[in-house]
Amino acid sequence: MNTRLTNSYYRRKIMKKVRVRFAPSPTGCLHLGGARTALFNWLFARHNKGSFILRIEDTDKERSTKEAVDVILKGLKWLGFDWDEGPEAGGDYGPYFQAQRSGIHREYADKLIKEDRAYYCYCSPEELEAMRKEARENGRPPKYNGRCRRLSDEQRKEYEGQGRKPVARFRTKQEGATKINDLIHGELSFENSLLDDFVILKSSGTATYNFAVVVDDIEMKISHVIRGDDHISNTPRQALLYGALDAALPEFAHIPMIFGSDKAKLSKRHGAVAVTMYEDEGYLNEAMVNYLALLGWSTSDSQQVFEIDDLIKKFTLGGCSKSASIFDFQKLEWLNGEYIRKMDIDELTEKAMPFISGAGLRVDDRERVKKAVLMEQEKIKLLKDIPGLIDFMLKDDMEYDDRAKNKVLKKEGAGEVLSDMLERIKGLDDFSEKGLEEAVRKYCEEKGLKTGKVFHPLRAAVSGRTTGPGLFVMLEFIGRERVMKRIEDAMKYTQ
RNA sequence: GGCGCAUUCGUCUAGUGGUUUAGGACAUUGCCCUCUCAAGGCAAAGAUCACGGGUUCGAAUCCCGUAUGCGCUACCA
C-alpha cells in the first residue's frame, strides 16, 4: 500500500475527528440555557464518537468565582454530561481554565502585532467614550475611529511616558463581506465595513472574549462550535481572526435561546434557574435532559420520550430549530411523571428517601416506605410531592382535610356505615387486602348499599382525604389497630 | 441609530412548491374505565402558518418589503 496515501487518509481522519466544547464563564450558576448548550454539544460528540471538552472561560477576573465553577461542574455531572477533557479530567490540550492560557493568548497576539495585523492603542476609556458619543451625535456608527492605527515610534514613546497602558486592537479589514456557513441557519453574511478595530488584548494583558475563544478553539482543535445564537454577531469578528491566524474555520452551529414564560431571557424571576435547584425540587435528571432536548430540537415523527441512548443515536444538528423557545414547566412535569412511572420501585424509593426523611417522616422501615411509595407511584410528578402523598400511611396521627370532613363524612348514613365497619373489622379473620374487600363488599350487598356509599366514608375516615391509593391495599398497609382507631376518631365528624 | 437573527394552535414542534379540510406532544374540556385520585383509552376545542406585496397553474414552504421580539454594536462573556 502506498504510504503517502495512507498518511493523507489518516490525516483526513484526524482532521475530521469531532471535537466540541462547552465553554461556560463561571460568573454564575449553570442555568437552563447553558445546560441545553452543553447537552447539544455532548450529544453531538457522543453521536459522532468525538470528544466533549469542558473549558472554563474565566478571563473576567472580577466576576469569576471558584464557587461558580463548582456549581457548574456539579450541574453537568447531575445531568450526566461527562467530559473527555477539562477540569478534573485533564487532557492533552490544557490548561482548561482560560485564565491560565494567557501566555498562549499573548503569543498569538504578538504574532499578529509582528505581522501588523494588530496594533497597540493608547486611547483611554474616557477618550473612547467621547469618541463614541461624538460619532453618535453626528449620526455615525459608534466605531473606533482608528486613531492609533498608524502611530510613530515617538508617539508611542510619548504615550508610554505618560504611563498609558495600551490595548491591542485587531486591524479589521474594511472591504468585502465575511460569509459563514452555519449548520443550522445556513449562510450568514456580514459587511466587514461595519466592524471596527476591536480589542484583542486588554490593557491588563489578558485576552478579550473574542480573541481568547478563537485562540483556544484553534489550539484545542475544536471542529464544531455549537453555542447560543446570541453569539451570531460575534462570529464575523472571530472568522476574521481565524483568517489572520491562518487557521481553518471550524463549523458553526448557533442554537436558539430559551426564554421564560414572559418571553424574556431566563432569570431569577423564573424560579429555580440553577440546574441543581431542579434536583432539589425533585426533578429527575433523565427527565430534565429529555425535556431540554425537546426545546429546540425534534425528530420528524415528533417523538417525545427519549431514553438517553436513543437521544444519542438520533441527535443531529439538522433537527435543531432556529427560533427561541419558551420553557414550559408543565411539560417538564409531565415528562418527570413519565419517568417516575417507568422507574424501578427500589430506585425510586432510593431517590425519594431524602425527600421523605426531610419531611420528618420515619424511614427506618425501608420496606414499608417502599410499599407506600409504590402505592402512589403513578401519581407522582415531582419527588418533592411524595411525602405529602404518603405521610398519612406512615404516621400514627393524621389530619382530616376539608373535603373529607365536610363533604364525605357529613353525608347521610356515613355514621352508621362507619360504626358497622368498625364492628366488622374488629371481628375480621383475614385482615388483608383480599379479606377486607370481600368483607366490605359483602356488607354492601347485605345492606343493599352502593359500594361508593361505603368505600368513600371509609376512605375518608382512615386516610383523612378523598384521594389516595386503592382502598383495601391502603387499609391492609395501615393495619387493623390504626384503622379502627381512625374510624372511631372520624365518627365525631358524622351527623 | 446601524447590523444580524427569528416569527406555524396558549406552549414545544412536524412540515423544505401540489399527498394539508396544516400532523403530533404538553396544557384545557368532555366521554369511557373505575372505590377516590391518578394512569390509560377515545374525542373535542385550539393556528386566516406575524402582516403586506410579488413569483407560480398552485406557497406555511421561493423572493421583496413592513411590524414585532431578541442579539451584537464594551479593555463582559
Image (spheres, helix red, strand yellow):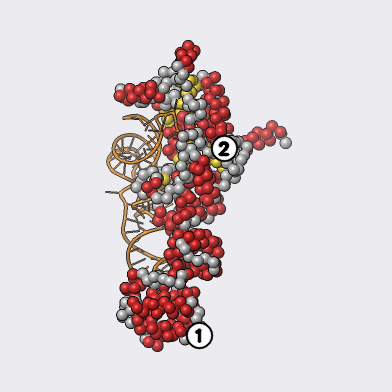
Q: Which residue is mark 2?
A: A96
Farthest bottom residue?
A: A446
Quarter of the image for residue B75 reads top left
Q: Secondary structure at mark 2?
A: loop
Q: Is any part of residue A99 visible from this angle?
A: yes
Identify which residue is drawn at 42% across, 50% down: A272
Front in this rendered view, residue A218 or A119 = A119
Label 2: chain?
A: A
- Residue A362 on image: x %, y %: 50, 66
Q: Quadrant of the C terminus of chain A?
A: bottom left
Identify which residue is drawn at 55% across, 23% down: A111
- Residue A306 on image: x %, y %: 51, 55
Which amino acid does the dot numbered 1 rest on?
Asp
Which amino acid does the dot numbered 2 rest on?
Tyr
Give above or below for A121 relative to A432. above
Give above or below for A440 relative to B30. below
- Label 2, residues with CA under 10 Å away: few <14, some 14-19, many ≥20: many
Q: Quadrant of the N terminus of chain A?
A: top right
Q: Which residue is mark 1?
A: A429
Give above or below for B48 relative to A482. above
